[in-house]
Amino acid sequence: MRFYMPTRLYQEENCVSCHAAELAALGTHALIVTGRHSSRKNGSLEDVISALQSQQTEVTVFDAVEENPSVETVMKARALGLAEGADFVIGIGGGSPMDAAKAIAVMLAAPDKEWDYLYASCHAPAVPVAAVPTTCGTGSEVTGVAVLTRHDLGTKVSMTHRVFPHLALADGKYLLGAPQQMLVNTAVDALSHLIETVINAGADAYSDMTAFAGLAAWRECRGVLEGTAALDPASAQALMHASSLAGMSIAQTGTGIPHALSYLLTTQGGIPHGAAVGAFQANFLRHADAGRRDAVLRAAGFADPDALGGWIRTFAPVSVDAALLRQSADVVLQNPAKLATCPYPVNAGVMDALIVGVAEGAGV
Protein backbone atom coordinates (compact mmCIF):
# COMPACT_ATOMS: atom_id res chain seq x y z
CA MET A 1 0.00 0.00 0.00
CA ARG A 2 1.05 3.59 -0.47
CA PHE A 3 -0.22 7.07 0.23
CA TYR A 4 1.33 10.29 -1.07
CA MET A 5 -0.19 13.75 -0.66
CA PRO A 6 2.59 16.34 -0.24
CA THR A 7 0.32 19.41 -0.46
CA ARG A 8 -0.20 21.44 2.69
CA LEU A 9 -3.96 22.02 2.75
CA TYR A 10 -5.83 24.59 4.80
CA GLN A 11 -9.61 24.28 4.56
CA GLU A 12 -11.11 27.02 6.66
CA GLU A 13 -12.78 30.40 6.56
CA ASN A 14 -10.56 33.25 5.36
CA CYS A 15 -7.63 30.88 4.93
CA VAL A 16 -6.08 33.02 2.18
CA SER A 17 -5.54 35.99 4.47
CA CYS A 18 -4.79 33.83 7.50
CA HIS A 19 -1.93 32.10 5.69
CA ALA A 20 -0.66 35.06 3.66
CA ALA A 21 2.88 34.71 4.99
CA GLU A 22 3.05 31.05 4.02
CA LEU A 23 1.70 31.85 0.56
CA ALA A 24 4.22 34.64 0.02
CA ALA A 25 7.07 32.44 1.24
CA LEU A 26 6.84 30.44 -2.00
CA GLY A 27 8.73 33.17 -3.88
CA THR A 28 9.20 36.85 -4.56
CA HIS A 29 6.91 37.40 -7.58
CA ALA A 30 3.65 35.53 -8.08
CA LEU A 31 2.10 34.78 -11.45
CA ILE A 32 -1.62 34.45 -10.67
CA VAL A 33 -3.39 32.22 -13.19
CA THR A 34 -7.16 32.47 -13.42
CA GLY A 35 -10.16 32.90 -15.73
CA ARG A 36 -11.66 36.13 -16.92
CA HIS A 37 -14.61 36.59 -14.59
CA SER A 38 -15.42 34.21 -11.73
CA SER A 39 -12.42 34.88 -9.48
CA ARG A 40 -13.21 38.59 -9.60
CA LYS A 41 -16.89 37.99 -8.93
CA ASN A 42 -16.41 35.67 -5.95
CA GLY A 43 -13.65 37.75 -4.38
CA SER A 44 -10.90 35.14 -4.49
CA LEU A 45 -8.62 37.14 -6.79
CA GLU A 46 -8.87 40.23 -4.61
CA ASP A 47 -8.18 38.14 -1.50
CA VAL A 48 -5.04 36.60 -2.99
CA ILE A 49 -3.69 39.91 -4.30
CA SER A 50 -4.32 41.57 -0.94
CA ALA A 51 -2.63 38.72 0.92
CA LEU A 52 0.46 38.95 -1.27
CA GLN A 53 0.62 42.73 -1.10
CA SER A 54 0.45 42.54 2.69
CA GLN A 55 3.70 40.58 2.47
CA GLN A 56 5.32 42.93 -0.09
CA THR A 57 5.24 40.24 -2.76
CA GLU A 58 5.04 41.29 -6.40
CA VAL A 59 2.05 40.13 -8.46
CA THR A 60 1.32 39.60 -12.15
CA VAL A 61 -2.14 38.40 -13.23
CA PHE A 62 -2.80 36.17 -16.24
CA ASP A 63 -6.60 36.02 -16.53
CA ALA A 64 -7.11 34.32 -19.89
CA VAL A 65 -7.43 30.67 -18.88
CA GLU A 66 -10.27 29.08 -20.81
CA GLU A 67 -12.37 26.08 -19.82
CA ASN A 68 -10.33 22.97 -20.59
CA PRO A 69 -7.09 24.95 -20.94
CA SER A 70 -4.90 24.37 -23.95
CA VAL A 71 -1.16 23.97 -24.25
CA GLU A 72 -1.18 27.20 -26.25
CA THR A 73 -2.62 29.07 -23.27
CA VAL A 74 0.05 27.56 -21.04
CA MET A 75 2.73 28.94 -23.33
CA LYS A 76 1.16 32.42 -23.40
CA ALA A 77 1.11 32.51 -19.61
CA ARG A 78 4.69 31.22 -19.46
CA ALA A 79 5.78 34.07 -21.74
CA LEU A 80 4.12 36.64 -19.46
CA GLY A 81 5.63 35.07 -16.37
CA LEU A 82 9.12 35.08 -17.82
CA ALA A 83 8.79 38.69 -18.99
CA GLU A 84 7.69 39.83 -15.52
CA GLY A 85 10.16 37.73 -13.55
CA ALA A 86 7.65 35.46 -11.80
CA ASP A 87 9.17 32.71 -9.68
CA PHE A 88 6.02 30.96 -8.44
CA VAL A 89 2.48 30.36 -9.69
CA ILE A 90 -0.94 30.55 -8.03
CA GLY A 91 -3.94 28.94 -9.70
CA ILE A 92 -7.30 30.42 -8.70
CA GLY A 93 -10.58 28.87 -9.83
CA GLY A 94 -11.76 25.45 -10.86
CA GLY A 95 -9.73 22.67 -12.39
CA SER A 96 -8.87 24.67 -15.49
CA PRO A 97 -6.79 27.43 -13.83
CA MET A 98 -5.30 25.05 -11.27
CA ASP A 99 -4.27 22.52 -13.92
CA ALA A 100 -2.92 25.31 -16.11
CA ALA A 101 -0.90 26.65 -13.16
CA LYS A 102 0.88 23.31 -12.75
CA ALA A 103 1.79 23.16 -16.42
CA ILE A 104 2.92 26.79 -16.42
CA ALA A 105 5.13 26.05 -13.40
CA VAL A 106 6.89 23.34 -15.42
CA MET A 107 7.40 25.63 -18.39
CA LEU A 108 8.66 28.54 -16.26
CA ALA A 109 11.36 26.23 -14.96
CA ALA A 110 12.30 25.34 -18.56
CA PRO A 111 12.34 28.66 -20.43
CA ASP A 112 14.09 27.20 -23.47
CA LYS A 113 11.57 24.40 -24.02
CA GLU A 114 8.52 24.22 -26.29
CA TRP A 115 5.10 22.92 -25.22
CA ASP A 116 5.89 19.31 -26.14
CA TYR A 117 8.15 19.27 -23.07
CA LEU A 118 4.94 18.89 -21.05
CA TYR A 119 4.71 15.37 -22.48
CA ALA A 120 8.39 14.42 -22.32
CA SER A 121 9.40 11.21 -20.56
CA CYS A 122 11.80 12.79 -18.12
CA HIS A 123 11.90 14.39 -14.72
CA ALA A 124 10.80 18.00 -15.05
CA PRO A 125 11.39 20.49 -12.23
CA ALA A 126 8.76 23.14 -11.62
CA VAL A 127 8.60 26.44 -9.79
CA PRO A 128 6.40 26.35 -6.65
CA VAL A 129 2.63 26.25 -7.10
CA ALA A 130 -0.24 27.29 -4.82
CA ALA A 131 -3.91 26.56 -5.50
CA VAL A 132 -7.06 28.38 -4.43
CA PRO A 133 -10.11 26.33 -5.51
CA THR A 134 -13.39 28.13 -6.15
CA THR A 135 -15.44 25.14 -7.33
CA CYS A 136 -16.26 21.90 -5.55
CA GLY A 137 -15.31 19.16 -7.97
CA THR A 138 -11.88 18.85 -9.49
CA GLY A 139 -9.75 18.38 -6.39
CA SER A 140 -6.83 19.69 -8.45
CA GLU A 141 -5.57 21.56 -5.40
CA VAL A 142 -4.37 18.24 -3.93
CA THR A 143 -3.33 16.26 -7.01
CA GLY A 144 -0.24 16.27 -9.20
CA VAL A 145 -2.20 15.95 -12.42
CA ALA A 146 -2.79 18.62 -15.08
CA VAL A 147 -5.17 17.77 -17.91
CA LEU A 148 -4.70 19.99 -20.96
CA THR A 149 -6.45 20.32 -24.30
CA ARG A 150 -4.35 19.18 -27.23
CA HIS A 151 -5.80 20.79 -30.36
CA ASP A 152 -3.43 18.72 -32.46
CA LEU A 153 -5.15 15.57 -31.16
CA GLY A 154 -8.65 16.97 -30.65
CA THR A 155 -8.87 15.76 -27.06
CA LYS A 156 -7.56 16.29 -23.52
CA VAL A 157 -4.35 14.64 -22.34
CA SER A 158 -2.67 14.73 -18.93
CA MET A 159 0.84 16.12 -18.96
CA THR A 160 3.35 13.43 -18.05
CA HIS A 161 4.90 15.34 -15.14
CA ARG A 162 3.45 15.34 -11.64
CA VAL A 163 3.24 18.73 -9.95
CA PHE A 164 1.52 18.85 -6.59
CA PRO A 165 0.77 22.32 -5.24
CA HIS A 166 2.98 23.21 -2.32
CA LEU A 167 0.02 24.95 -0.68
CA ALA A 168 -3.76 24.73 -1.10
CA LEU A 169 -6.15 27.26 0.43
CA ALA A 170 -9.77 26.08 0.26
CA ASP A 171 -12.45 28.46 1.51
CA GLY A 172 -16.10 27.57 0.97
CA LYS A 173 -17.13 31.22 0.85
CA TYR A 174 -16.07 31.34 -2.80
CA LEU A 175 -18.93 28.96 -3.63
CA LEU A 176 -21.66 31.09 -2.11
CA GLY A 177 -22.49 33.08 -5.24
CA ALA A 178 -21.88 30.27 -7.72
CA PRO A 179 -24.59 29.25 -10.21
CA GLN A 180 -26.52 26.19 -9.05
CA GLN A 181 -25.72 24.17 -12.17
CA MET A 182 -22.02 24.80 -11.75
CA LEU A 183 -22.21 23.53 -8.17
CA VAL A 184 -24.01 20.41 -9.33
CA ASN A 185 -21.72 19.68 -12.27
CA THR A 186 -18.56 20.07 -10.24
CA ALA A 187 -19.98 18.08 -7.31
CA VAL A 188 -20.83 15.25 -9.74
CA ASP A 189 -17.19 15.36 -10.83
CA ALA A 190 -16.16 14.93 -7.19
CA LEU A 191 -18.59 12.02 -6.80
CA SER A 192 -17.11 10.46 -9.92
CA HIS A 193 -13.60 10.76 -8.49
CA LEU A 194 -14.74 8.94 -5.38
CA ILE A 195 -16.48 6.15 -7.30
CA GLU A 196 -13.55 5.68 -9.66
CA THR A 197 -11.16 5.46 -6.71
CA VAL A 198 -13.10 2.65 -5.03
CA ILE A 199 -13.80 0.80 -8.28
CA ASN A 200 -10.16 0.76 -9.31
CA ALA A 201 -7.48 -1.86 -9.76
CA GLY A 202 -5.15 0.28 -7.65
CA ALA A 203 -7.51 0.70 -4.69
CA ASP A 204 -6.21 -0.17 -1.25
CA ALA A 205 -7.01 0.57 2.39
CA TYR A 206 -5.51 4.06 2.21
CA SER A 207 -7.39 5.14 -0.91
CA ASP A 208 -10.55 3.62 0.58
CA MET A 209 -9.96 5.74 3.68
CA THR A 210 -10.19 9.04 1.80
CA ALA A 211 -12.76 7.83 -0.75
CA PHE A 212 -15.34 6.62 1.75
CA ALA A 213 -14.82 9.68 3.93
CA GLY A 214 -15.44 11.73 0.80
CA LEU A 215 -18.58 9.80 -0.09
CA ALA A 216 -19.98 10.42 3.39
CA ALA A 217 -19.18 14.14 3.12
CA TRP A 218 -20.71 14.29 -0.36
CA ARG A 219 -23.92 12.64 0.87
CA GLU A 220 -24.33 15.37 3.49
CA CYS A 221 -24.46 17.95 0.67
CA ARG A 222 -27.12 16.29 -1.47
CA GLY A 223 -29.89 18.57 -0.26
CA VAL A 224 -27.96 21.63 -1.43
CA LEU A 225 -27.36 20.03 -4.83
CA GLU A 226 -31.01 19.03 -5.14
CA GLY A 227 -32.20 22.51 -4.19
CA THR A 228 -34.01 21.34 -1.07
CA ALA A 229 -31.52 22.93 1.34
CA ALA A 230 -29.91 26.36 1.27
CA LEU A 231 -26.27 26.87 0.44
CA ASP A 232 -24.77 28.52 3.53
CA PRO A 233 -21.20 28.87 4.80
CA ALA A 234 -21.30 25.49 6.55
CA SER A 235 -22.63 23.56 3.56
CA ALA A 236 -20.26 25.40 1.20
CA GLN A 237 -17.32 24.32 3.33
CA ALA A 238 -18.70 20.77 3.35
CA LEU A 239 -18.77 20.77 -0.46
CA MET A 240 -15.14 21.89 -0.50
CA HIS A 241 -14.33 19.15 2.00
CA ALA A 242 -15.87 16.44 -0.18
CA SER A 243 -14.07 17.78 -3.23
CA SER A 244 -10.65 17.83 -1.58
CA LEU A 245 -11.13 14.31 -0.21
CA ALA A 246 -12.03 13.21 -3.72
CA GLY A 247 -8.87 14.86 -5.03
CA MET A 248 -6.74 13.10 -2.41
CA SER A 249 -8.37 9.85 -3.48
CA ILE A 250 -7.60 10.08 -7.20
CA ALA A 251 -4.09 11.26 -6.34
CA GLN A 252 -3.55 7.67 -5.15
CA THR A 253 -5.30 5.67 -7.87
CA GLY A 254 -5.85 7.96 -10.83
CA THR A 255 -9.20 8.26 -12.55
CA GLY A 256 -10.88 5.42 -14.41
CA ILE A 257 -12.73 4.64 -17.60
CA PRO A 258 -15.62 7.14 -17.11
CA HIS A 259 -13.13 10.00 -17.12
CA ALA A 260 -11.45 8.68 -20.23
CA LEU A 261 -14.83 8.37 -21.96
CA SER A 262 -15.70 11.96 -21.07
CA TYR A 263 -12.82 13.77 -22.75
CA LEU A 264 -14.10 13.83 -26.33
CA LEU A 265 -17.58 14.66 -25.06
CA THR A 266 -16.13 17.77 -23.45
CA THR A 267 -13.63 18.92 -26.06
CA GLN A 268 -15.73 18.12 -29.14
CA GLY A 269 -19.27 17.98 -27.76
CA GLY A 270 -19.13 20.99 -25.46
CA ILE A 271 -20.54 19.06 -22.49
CA PRO A 272 -19.39 20.28 -19.04
CA HIS A 273 -16.76 17.96 -17.66
CA GLY A 274 -18.60 16.90 -14.50
CA ALA A 275 -21.82 16.08 -16.35
CA ALA A 276 -19.91 14.19 -19.04
CA VAL A 277 -18.11 12.05 -16.45
CA GLY A 278 -21.24 11.49 -14.40
CA ALA A 279 -23.16 10.09 -17.36
CA PHE A 280 -21.13 6.86 -17.21
CA GLN A 281 -21.07 6.22 -13.46
CA ALA A 282 -24.17 4.05 -13.11
CA ASN A 283 -23.14 1.70 -15.91
CA PHE A 284 -19.58 1.63 -14.61
CA LEU A 285 -20.83 0.49 -11.20
CA ARG A 286 -23.11 -2.23 -12.62
CA HIS A 287 -20.15 -4.34 -13.67
CA ALA A 288 -18.13 -3.90 -10.47
CA ASP A 289 -17.69 -6.36 -7.63
CA ALA A 290 -21.04 -6.43 -5.85
CA GLY A 291 -19.58 -5.78 -2.41
CA ARG A 292 -17.64 -2.71 -3.41
CA ARG A 293 -20.44 -1.46 -5.65
CA ASP A 294 -22.99 -1.68 -2.85
CA ALA A 295 -20.61 -0.07 -0.37
CA VAL A 296 -20.21 2.92 -2.69
CA LEU A 297 -23.94 3.25 -3.22
CA ARG A 298 -24.71 3.03 0.50
CA ALA A 299 -22.07 5.62 1.34
CA ALA A 300 -23.40 8.05 -1.27
CA GLY A 301 -27.04 7.40 -0.32
CA PHE A 302 -28.35 5.53 -3.37
CA ALA A 303 -30.28 2.27 -3.35
CA ASP A 304 -28.85 0.88 -6.58
CA PRO A 305 -27.22 1.94 -9.87
CA ASP A 306 -30.63 2.88 -11.30
CA ALA A 307 -31.16 5.37 -8.47
CA LEU A 308 -27.71 6.86 -9.01
CA GLY A 309 -28.20 7.11 -12.76
CA GLY A 310 -31.62 8.69 -12.32
CA TRP A 311 -30.23 11.26 -9.91
CA ILE A 312 -27.41 12.26 -12.24
CA ARG A 313 -29.78 12.32 -15.21
CA THR A 314 -32.09 14.67 -13.29
CA PHE A 315 -29.52 17.10 -11.91
CA ALA A 316 -26.67 16.91 -14.45
CA PRO A 317 -28.34 15.89 -17.72
CA VAL A 318 -26.39 15.47 -20.95
CA SER A 319 -27.22 15.19 -24.61
CA VAL A 320 -24.54 13.27 -26.47
CA ASP A 321 -24.15 12.70 -30.18
CA ALA A 322 -24.15 8.95 -30.76
CA ALA A 323 -21.30 9.06 -33.25
CA LEU A 324 -19.10 11.03 -30.87
CA LEU A 325 -19.92 8.61 -28.07
CA ARG A 326 -18.94 5.67 -30.28
CA GLN A 327 -15.72 7.42 -31.23
CA SER A 328 -14.90 8.01 -27.57
CA ALA A 329 -15.52 4.37 -26.71
CA ASP A 330 -13.26 3.20 -29.54
CA VAL A 331 -10.48 5.53 -28.39
CA VAL A 332 -10.65 4.20 -24.84
CA LEU A 333 -10.61 0.59 -26.07
CA GLN A 334 -7.26 1.38 -27.68
CA ASN A 335 -5.82 2.70 -24.41
CA PRO A 336 -4.34 -0.25 -22.48
CA ALA A 337 -3.13 1.94 -19.61
CA LYS A 338 -6.61 3.27 -18.93
CA LEU A 339 -8.25 -0.14 -19.31
CA ALA A 340 -5.78 -1.48 -16.74
CA THR A 341 -7.22 0.86 -14.09
CA CYS A 342 -10.51 -1.05 -14.19
CA PRO A 343 -10.81 -3.95 -11.72
CA TYR A 344 -12.91 -5.96 -14.17
CA PRO A 345 -12.08 -6.88 -17.79
CA VAL A 346 -13.31 -4.45 -20.42
CA ASN A 347 -13.73 -5.76 -23.94
CA ALA A 348 -15.86 -4.42 -26.78
CA GLY A 349 -19.02 -5.95 -25.33
CA VAL A 350 -18.47 -4.49 -21.88
CA MET A 351 -17.67 -1.11 -23.42
CA ASP A 352 -20.98 -1.21 -25.28
CA ALA A 353 -22.68 -1.82 -21.94
CA LEU A 354 -20.82 1.09 -20.35
CA ILE A 355 -22.08 3.57 -22.94
CA VAL A 356 -25.57 2.21 -23.54
CA GLY A 357 -28.25 4.84 -23.03
CA VAL A 358 -25.82 7.75 -22.68
CA ALA A 359 -26.45 9.04 -26.22
CA GLU A 360 -30.08 9.48 -25.24
CA GLY A 361 -29.09 11.23 -22.05
CA ALA A 362 -30.09 8.27 -19.88
CA GLY A 363 -26.73 7.40 -18.41
CA VAL A 364 -28.15 4.08 -17.28
Image (tube, grey):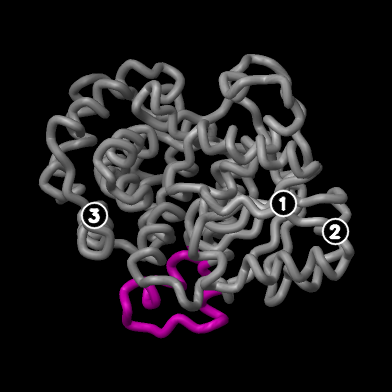
What is the spatial separation of the Cα atoms under label 2 and label 1, in whole angstroms?
A: 14 Å
Q: Is residue 114 magenta?
A: no
Q: Residue at x 66, y 32 (%)?
A: 162
Q: Earlier in the sequence, mark 3 or mark 1?
A: 1
Label 3 to label 2: alpha-carbon separation: 48 Å
Indicate whether residue 217 is drawn in magenta.
Answer: yes
The magenta span reads 216-239
Q: Nearer the viewer, residue 355 or 77?
A: 77
Chain-order first, disc 2 or disc 1? 2
Q: Which is more foreground, mark 2 or mark 1? A: 2
Residue 304, image x and y in percent? 26, 56
Residue at left 34%, top 27%?
A: 154
Q: Main secondary structure of the magenta part?
A: helix
Say how many tags the image has: 3
Callout 3, which amino acid?
Answer: Gly
Label 1 SS: strand
Q: Which residue is mark 1?
A: 130
Choose between 159 and 261: the one closer to the eye: 159
